[in-house]
Amino acid sequence: LDPAFCSDMRPVEPVPEAERARFMGFVRPDGGVGTRNFIGVLTSVNCSATAVKAIAAHFTPERLAAYPNVDGVAAFAHTTGCGMSSPSPHFDLLRRTIGGTARNPNMAGALIVGLGCERNQVSDLLRSQGLEEGPLMRALVMQDVGGTRATIAAGIAAVEEMLPLANAVQRQPVSAAHISVGLQCGGSDGFSGISANPALGAAMDILVRHGGTAILSETPEIHGVEHMLTRRAISESVGRKLLDKLDWWKDYTRGHNGQFNGVVGPGNQAGGLANIVEKSLGSAMKGGTTPLVDVYDYAARIDKAGFVFMDSPGYDPVSATGQVAGGANLICFTTGRGSAYGCAPSPSLKLSTNTPLWVKQEEDIDLNAGEIADGDATVEGVGEKLFELMLATCSGQRTKSEVHGYGQNEFVPWYVGAVM
């Protein structure tokens, strides 16, 4: 298909700064704004996963009651960090994901724990990501500290020192321009492209007009409709960056039974989708209609406002992990099949595509876009309702997944390299 670069690109009419929507956020020293106020405990390698989980588990709601401005102490463990090629693109990707997560504006502070003999050495990790140790950025190496018990004790002590500093930060009114939303699409159905996804796109158009950022990802799920995005690119070079990502995916998935061969997952098939183009047509609608400003590598820091694209798999936990590492302080997640998902440190709002799903799984879903399919609401009306819900969520209103305690098990960096 003809990419027709920039042919459908229409400039955004921004809302004047003085008239932009506002929310109550946590302002960081670097100018970033958080919608939550977490302390993160991260690993350089899987070998320290048990230690970081034990450190975070110590900080129960009862122990955090004295720190009302702190949303929690969350563990971010993963399955790699050693047995991998270094240097390599995969090694860089892992470090970028860890570093970006530690820097996310929803993090008041971070503790990074390593084992000591891994390829992803803690000192080199910090250096490569521009992370400097200080009162709110700490690091421990288990082999230096003295093993598991000693590391857990030292980690608890380090977090206890951070808590008063994190608690001293209070919410204050800020512009909606500081909202950066990672867009996700779970199991889809025949209503996804006519209800939840276009309604999410309508909300993103509002957000972009207010100066915010919408991050579309899941590269396999725009396969077949990429020309819809290249036509909205602000330049041919931006459009070609997107096509280059798709070419990489064609090589990456060659010989595998996956979406680049036109096959959608069992849940999508059961929802009524026959092939990847039908899935992609709906998926692309999450990004709204504003110009495509830039295309980013997975977990790269998003440094431009507006509608952007981040390369990622379609697998939601991996994709959202990259968006959060890039700076997303909110996730919006549409589903036609039902979703049980949350994403610390960034709250996740879930939208159902149909009313029967909402009735069945209302405890997990935050907004019913099925009203559009029922004829009881418009895409624009649900988009406006969602935008108001986003502002309330960014100001501290808890999502359904936060009530259930989701988030710490959904940190899943993209694994693309050999295990050795």
Image (cartoon, helix red, strand yellow):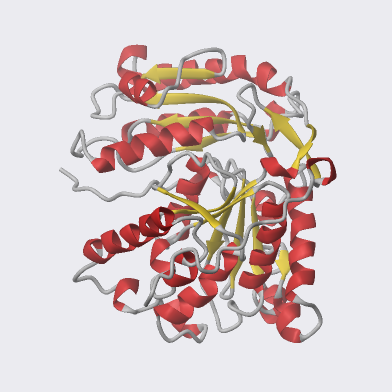
Q: Residue furthest left?
A: 420
Looking at the rendered structure, the number of numbered marks drawn on it comes to 0
| Residue beneath the point at 24% across and 61% down | 252
Residue 397, image x, y percentages: 77, 47
Residue nearer the viewer, 8 or 20: 8
* Observer-nearest of 259 and 270: 259
Determine the residue located farthest toward the right in the rendered image.
Answer: 19
Q: Residue at x 50, y 30 (%)?
A: 41
Q: Describe residue 241's horizontal placement relative to residue 388 as left or right.
A: left
Using the rendered image of the protein, determine whether residue 120 is visible from the camera's viewpoint.
yes
What's the residue at 68%, 35% (across, down)? 71
For the C terminus, the image quarter is top left
The x and y percentages for residue 72 are 64, 34
How far across and down, in percent of the image, does residue 77 sit? 42, 38
Foreground pick, 151 / 333: 333
Up-down relation of residue 294 to residue 191 (above or below): above
Looking at the picture, does residue 329 appear above or below residue 314? above
Q: Quadrant of the N terminus?
A: bottom left
Residue nearer the viewer, 374 or 16 = 16
Answer left or right for 327 relative to 202: left
The answer to whether any part of residue 60 appears in the image is no
Question: How far across and down, in percent of the image, does residue 364 sit?
Answer: 66, 63
When asked about the image quadrant of residue 179, the answer is top right
Q: Write down the quadrant of residue 255 in the picture.
A: bottom left
